Image (tube, rainbow, N blue to C red):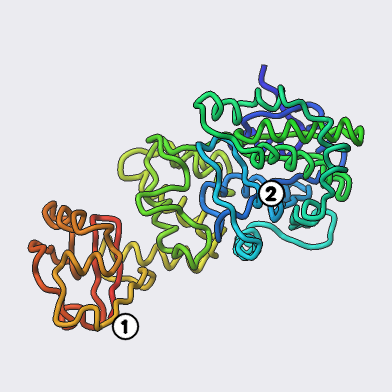
Amino acid sequence: MTYHPKSDFLNVMMARGYLADCTDMQGLDDALRNGTVSAYIGYDATAASLHVGHLLNIMMLRWLQKTGHRPITLMGGGTTKVGDPSFRADERPLLTAEKINENISGMGRVFARYLSYGDGAQDALMLNNAEWLDNLNYLEFLRDIGRHFSVNRMLSFESVKSRLDREQSLSFLEFNYMILQAYDFLELNRRYGCALQMGGSDQWGNIINGIDLTRRVADQQLFGLTSPLLATSDGKKMGKSANGAIWLDGDMLSPYDFWQFWRNSTDADVGRFLKLYTELPVEECDRLGALQGSEINGAKVILANEVTTLLHGRAAAEAAEATARAVFEQGGVGQELEVVTLPADTVGDGLSVVKFLVEAGLVASGKEAKRLVAENGLRFNNDAVEDANALVTCEVIGAELKVSIGKKKHRLVRLG
């Protein structure tokens, strides 16, 4: 029988589709009703920004705060030096301490858009596990913490087992990761009273380890809650596109391109995405997701506007919509298209269309450029380009040249 939670937070998690599994639904529900619960999600600093694949869990932290509890964003300044082996085919490349700190700074800017940080009981905390991991005494750690872990049990976790079953190497460095993550939960409970760890369903084993460790060492009851690993309706990994990751940093991906990612959602994903990535009422999300034909496109615009507003602000969302309308409906340029600057000396006396596209970084290869022209997928200033060998000169580019690749990718090329 489906559990019917009484706490606001678990109600939101279930109604909007965030919940995959929970270690103790009744116990967590009671804790949420009886006071402020501190909950954390860990983020290793493996890239300069977070991407759309992280957004579902960020929204969980946002809802936690909106329903009266305290979110903790735990930066993996320590664990990033090891690397999470969960469901990976190979070992992560190791980063320098300087690069890790630089990445943490970039990630922090994104979190500040979704959470309110401060010193109040429900204000979010941003912590770094390097604070307690960097100076661990190895022998003491093995004696006090390592003795609570069964290697047999650790080998049984699916994240590790799947790698060993494929006869892929798992280094001792990586094997330590799950112990360090479990220790994070213990330290967060000791220092900040944290009682709940959340994460994607691939983190289930790591979460269970932390709960068991804290029960053994500190005799504290902790909880774990996981979200589903999300894919689009056509089976693609959430947060990825043909052009790479959909970054949440405006300097790495323009608000316009972020808006377009959501506007280009498939019809079958609209209702689900509205519930997961916006704060519109569930009933409205269901209504919009059920629209058919051309009406679903209006729902996609609402989705794009709402998600972009949360990250980049209402003005950026409105500017992106106006640009999209100008580009797609009126054949214009718009104000928010990404600008590509090409040095004038690179153009020289002229480049072939193929070489121009490659030099401007608009295609990955000359072969792709030739195919684009052959399939009538390239336009300059809304005019079809039919000759892949035609010359693109400084005069052709002029003040700026609008380049359209297919129906959805548009750039302005300017001379630098």
Of all residues, the one furthest to the top in this rendering is 1
- Label 2 with label 1: CB-CB less than 8 Å: no
Location of residue 373 (image quadrant): bottom left
Q: Is residue 138 above or below residue 2?
A: below
The residue under the point 59% across, 57% down is: 95
The residue under the point 66% across, 25% down is: 155
Q: Residues within 10 Å of mark 1 (few under 14, many from 20)?
A: few
Residue 268, x across and y down, in percent: 40, 36
Q: Amino acid at mark 2?
A: Thr
Residue 20, x across and y down, in percent: 62, 30
- In this view of the protein, can residue 385 be seen by the observer? yes
Count of numbered badges drawn on the protein: 2
Of callouts 2 and 1, the N-terminal one? 2
Q: Quadrant of the N terminus?
A: top right
Q: Quadrant of the C terminus?
A: bottom left
* 368 horizontally vs 183: left or right: left
- In this view of the protein, can residue 124 be seen by the observer? no
Which residue is label 1 attached to?
Answer: 416
What numbered label is drawn on residue 335? Answer: none
Q: Secondary structure at mark 2?
A: helix
Location of residue 183 (image quadrant): top right
* 89 horizontally vs 114: left or right: left
Which residue is label 2 attached to?
Answer: 79
Q: Residues within 10 Å of mark 2 (few under 14, many from 20)?
A: many
Q: Nearer the viewer, residue 32 or 6?
A: 32
Residue 78, x across and y down, in percent: 71, 53
Q: Nearer the viewer, residue 165 or 339?
A: 165
The residue under the point 61% across, 38% down is: 171
Q: Is residue 342 above or below residue 10?
A: below
**3D distance between C-alphas at marks 2 and 1:** 42 Å
Residue 130, x across and y down, in percent: 75, 55
